[in-house]
Image (cartoon, rainbow, N blue to C red):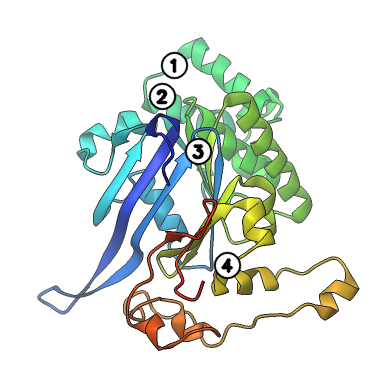
Amino acid sequence: MDTPKSDLMVEVKDLKMYFPIIRGLLRHHVADVKAVDDISFEIKKHETLGLVGESGCGKTTTGRCILRLYNPTSGNIFFAGKDISIIPERKVKPLRAQMGAIFQDPFGSLNPRQTAGSIVGDPLKVHNMATGSELEDRVTELFRLVGLDPSMKDRVPHEFSGGQRQRIGVARALACSPSLVICDEPISALDVSIQAQIINLLEELQGRLGLTYLFIAHDLAVVQHISDRVAVMYLGRIMELTTSEELYENPLHPYTRALLSAIPIPDPVAEKTRMRIVLKGEVPSPVNPPPGCHFHPRCHLAIADCSAARPSLRDAGGGHFVACIRV
């Protein structure tokens, strides 16, 4: 990962996010939930990095750390060359104007008592970027930008369809003209036909506005379509990181191969003849993860050395990073 610093939007180094478990009358700290356990990656300017993995692997926590909604346990997060992991809370607000977030639930993330226009305009009020007629004009512009009729500004969220509500969420994320947008499973709660519309909208906006995306999802087919590079997470760690094309054509990590083998192929002959990798057991608890490689209890290629030491994320050639001693 030797990209020039000037070409990077985000650089994450050795990030850890542990949530303490407190028990008893005396509130003893008995353990930690290791949601993100020492990960490093980069997001280049104007690219889309897909972050995929099973539920509970730490994808959303990673995104919230970058937004500084969580204060990381340790590690560094550089945004546009500035280490934002050490900035005090009172100085985080101006940074958030340069970041946007699109959330998973297009209804739960919108205030049901606010009008759509008020929801989209809120970030501009919070950051004192527009008032009065200027605010109204900007909200109108944002509605048109995401494909909504500005006459809908006075409606409340329950008067919109799921896809329209997510468009409101996209407009709100773009209100302050951010350079980075964290997309936290923005289409998983939508119908398949609507998913395609939102994905196309995000791609169109990226090209028009020069945006950088961290696209968090569990749907590998969607991630393949929208992402330039993909990072595969498992139990708080990154297992594989490479370009989208390389990941799908030449997956190296056993976990990535298992995930890809679960994607149905629209070809009955190929679907019948290909090998399906079925993972054994359940995902271990992030409170007490396995020693060494976190994936080794479920890996069909595991050997004794896999539990002895943690494999580093190393370059297997051509910028294809993998954390597996068997590769």
* Label annotation for residue 130: 1
Foreground of the two, 121 or 271? 271
Residue at horizontal 71%, vertical 49%? Answer: 195
Examine the image and state in which quarter residue 189 appears: bottom right
Task: Describe the element under mark 2 as helix, strand or loop.
Answer: helix
Q: Are marks 2 and 3 in contact (CB under 8 Å)?
A: no
Which residue type carries mark 1? Ala
- Relative vertical location of residue 240 with respect to residue 215 in this rendering, above or below: below
Q: Nearer the viewer, residue 221 or 124?
A: 221
Read off the residue under disc 2: 125
- The residues bearing labels 1 and 4 have C-alpha atoms spaced at a distance of 50 Å
Residue 143: x and y in percent read 64, 26
Q: Mark 3 vs mark 1: which is more N-terminal?
A: 1
- Of marks 4 and 2, which one's residue comes earlier in the chain? 2
Determine which residue is flagged by label 3: 181
- Under mark 4, the amino acid is Leu
Q: Are marks 2 and 1 in contact (CB under 8 Å)?
A: yes
Q: CA distance from mark 2 to mark 1?
A: 6 Å
